[in-house]
Structures are given as structure tokens and as C-alpha cells.
């Protein structure tokens, strides 16, 4: 089965919600008086760092895997990923009792490599370029006959990621804004699709590292601009925006803002120290955007999707 490139709808997100309900956690929505005082708004954190595999990616991966036919599932699934999607796919495959084959760049964080192995996937390492990932994956798929599940350029993945925003709006239907980081765009597109379909007047904002700003530039220009040598601590956001997510982002997202590396690190450390919560650099990006006042949140109710908490503790940025 090929990657599904027909844009998903709210009905697909609702189907995904039912499909993954017995596997994925409904994660908490937490707030902090300190953060509210610092920003002047009411900020709610959707804590996908408490999701299975420690990241939102489990939603999309489990939706994709449990929507496969028996014939497709028997051959297993394959993907390329620097970490969280790999872990998510490996666990979802294990839950369905099928093989998972993962291509990972040789510089992937150790904690993520270890987790993928622990979930039972077979790992093939490659150079840390998109070309190397894709060519190695083609070889793996040709050898195994596995179904390729793209990390973000797939309707099943996007629909699964959109279930987090659906939960957020059930908990707080009066939200003014919802924010998510953007790398490949699976989360932001799913969030925007779900949020705007449920509440058309809500603002949806993406946040991206200034050192990997292809989504920002693509959004401004109205056409896909590939990322060039992304040099950011946010390892989950180093990838180029996908075509399918971009089509939904252009339709539903209100704005994309960027933040510098030092602000990402400061926001990440603030959340660790003040909220006693482990978060990855990738999800510190929208937090940094709020702290840096790249978006006006004063007097507004704002949800930020905290995408994951899988951090290499031997390689912290401070």
C-alpha cells in the first residue's frame, strides 16, 4: 500500500479517534500560574510527552497501522525517522503483532535508538541526509515487502495527529488559539484541520526554529521551499515540510513564526525547572514563541501541544 496522499477530513480524524482509543492515552492539559503571569494569557499545555513512547507520534502511527488490511499488515511496516515516529511505529507494530523496519540516521539521539530497539523494530542506519534515508528505505521495502508509513506525508498519520487537538477542544471549547511546532507538518496540519473544523474562529499558529525555517518561508511564499542544512537543537524539526501537510497548512493555519536557538533552549530549561516537566527542544519552540512575544497572547486562552519528552540526558543543551 502506498502513502495515502488524499487530504484527510474531520471525519477521518473522528475515525482515527475511535480506532486508537484503546491504545493511545488521553493526555492531560496542564497550566501554570507562573507561565500565565509571565505571558499575560491563560496557557494550557497538552502534554503529549506523557503519551505512549513519550510523544504525540504514537497517535498517527497507531492509526496508520491499525487501518492496514490483514494482508498488508502481515508483511510489516517500514519507515525512516530520527526518533519519535520510529518508536511510535515500532510500538504500534508490536501491539498489532507485525514486524517493523526502521531506517535511522547515524546521528539519531541514543535514547531514541535504544527505545526503537526495545520496542522490537529492526534498525538500519544510514547517513544523516534525506537522500540517504530515502534510498536506504527503498532497499528495505524492496527486500521485505513492508508497507511504507511516512512520518508525516500521509493522510492516516495526519488524521491520527489531529486527535490531540480534538481532545484539547473538548476540554476547553472556549480556546482562542492553539499552537504546535512544525517540522514535516503532520502535527500542525492535523491540529489545524481538527481545530478549524470544530471551531472555525480559533487561531492556529505554527512555530519553527529560525535555523530550520522552511515551513515559515513556504507559508510566506505560498509554495514549498525545501529546508537547507538545518542546524537546530530541535532534532524533530530538521526535516522539510511535506506536500500533503502543506496543502492543509495553507488552508487552515493563520500564521507561522520562528524563534532563535537561544530562545528554544531558554524555554526548554524554563519548563524543566519551573514546571518540573521533561520536554524536548522541539516542543520548546512554540513555548519560546509565546515567551518572545512573537504571538500576542495577552488576555487569551491558548493551548500549546507539548509534543514529546524523549531527551538524551547525556547531551543536554545547558
Image: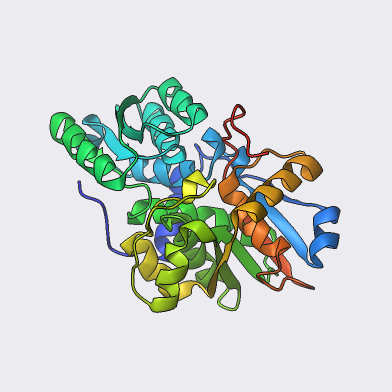
Q: Tell me how the rendering is colored.
A: rainbow
Residue at 39%, 53% (x, y): give it. Answer: 229
The number of numbered discs placed on residues in the rendered structure image is: 0
Residue at 47%, 23% (x, y): give it. Answer: 114
Q: Is residue 205 above or below residue 180?
A: below
Name the spot of residue 141 as percent of width and height, x first: 19, 36
Name the spot of residue 293 as percent of width and height, x first: 71, 68
Residue at 85%, 54% (x, y): give it. Answer: 34
Residue reaching furthest to the left: 142
Q: Is residue 116 above or below residue 288?
A: above
Q: Nearer the viewer, residue 307 or 133?
A: 133
Name the spot of residue 106 as percent of width and height, x first: 37, 31
Q: Do we see residue 15 in this rendering?
A: no
Q: Do we see residue 258 in this rendering?
A: yes
Q: Nearer the viewer, residue 213 or 166?
A: 213
Left or right: where does residue 151 sit relative to residue 211? left
Q: Nearer the viewer, residue 305 or 225?
A: 225
Name the spot of residue 220 as percent of width and height, x first: 44, 76
Residue 309, picture quadrant: top right
Residue at 48%, 26% (x, y): give it. Answer: 115
Assign the C terminus to one quadrant of the image: top right
Left or right: where does residue 286 sit relative to residue 156? right
Residue 97, picture quadrant: top left
Amino acid at each position: 500500500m502506498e502513502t495515502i496522499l488524499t487530504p484527510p477530513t474531520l471525519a477521518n480524524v473522528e475515525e482515527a479517534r475511535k480506532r486508537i482509543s484503546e491504545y493511545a492515552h488521553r493526555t492531560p492539559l496542564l497550566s501554570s500560574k507562573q507561565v500565565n503571569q509571565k505571558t499575560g494569557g491563560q496557557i494550557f499545555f497538552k502534554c503529549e510527552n506523557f503519551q505512549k513512547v513519550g510523544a504525540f507520534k504514537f497517535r498517527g502511527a497507531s492509526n496508520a497501522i491499525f487501518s492496514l488490511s490483514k494482508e498488508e499488515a502481515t508483511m510489516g511496516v517500514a519507515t525512516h525517522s530520527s526518533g519519535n515516529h520510529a518508536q511510535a511505529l515500532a510500538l504500534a507494530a508490536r501491539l498489532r503483532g507485525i514486524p517493523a523496519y526502521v531506517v535511522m540516521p547515524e546521528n539519531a539521539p541514543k535514547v531514541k535508538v535504544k527505545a526503537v530497539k526495545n520496542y522490537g523494530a529492526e534498525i538500519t542506519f544510514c547517513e544523516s541526509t534525506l537522500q540517504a534515508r530515502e534510498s536506504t528505505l527503498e532497499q528495505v521495502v524492496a527486500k521485505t515487502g513492508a508497507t511504507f508509513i511516512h512520518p508525516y506525508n500521509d493522510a492516516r498519520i495526519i488524521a491520527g495527529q489531529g486527535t490531540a487537538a480534538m481532545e484539547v477542544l473538548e476540554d476547553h471549547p472556549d480556546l482562542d488559539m492553539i499552537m504546535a511546532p512544525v517540522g514535516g507538518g503532520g502535527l500542525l496540519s492535523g491540529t489545524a484541520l481538527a481545530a478549524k473544523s470544530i471551531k472555525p474562529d480559533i487561531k492556529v499558529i505554527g512555530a519553527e526554529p529560525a535555523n530550520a525555517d522552511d515551513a515559515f518561508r513556504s507559508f510566506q511564499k505560498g509554495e514549498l521551499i525545501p529546508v537547507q542544512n538545518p542546524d537546530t537543537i530541535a532534532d524533530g524539526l530538521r526535516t522539510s515540510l511535506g506536500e500533503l501537510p502543506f496543502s492543509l497548512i495553507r488552508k487552515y493555519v493563520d500564521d507561522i513564526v520562528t524563534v532563535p536557538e537561544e530562545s528554544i533552549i531558554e524555554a526548554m530549561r524554563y519548563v524543566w525547572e519551573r514546571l518540573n516537566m521533561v520536554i524536548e527542544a522541539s516542543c520548546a519552540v512554540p513555548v519560546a514563541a509565546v515567551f518572545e512575544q512573537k504571538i500576542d497572547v495577552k488576555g487569551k486562552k491558548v493551548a500549546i501541544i507539548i509534543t514529546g519528552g524523549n531527551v538524551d540526558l547525556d547531551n543536554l543543551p545547558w
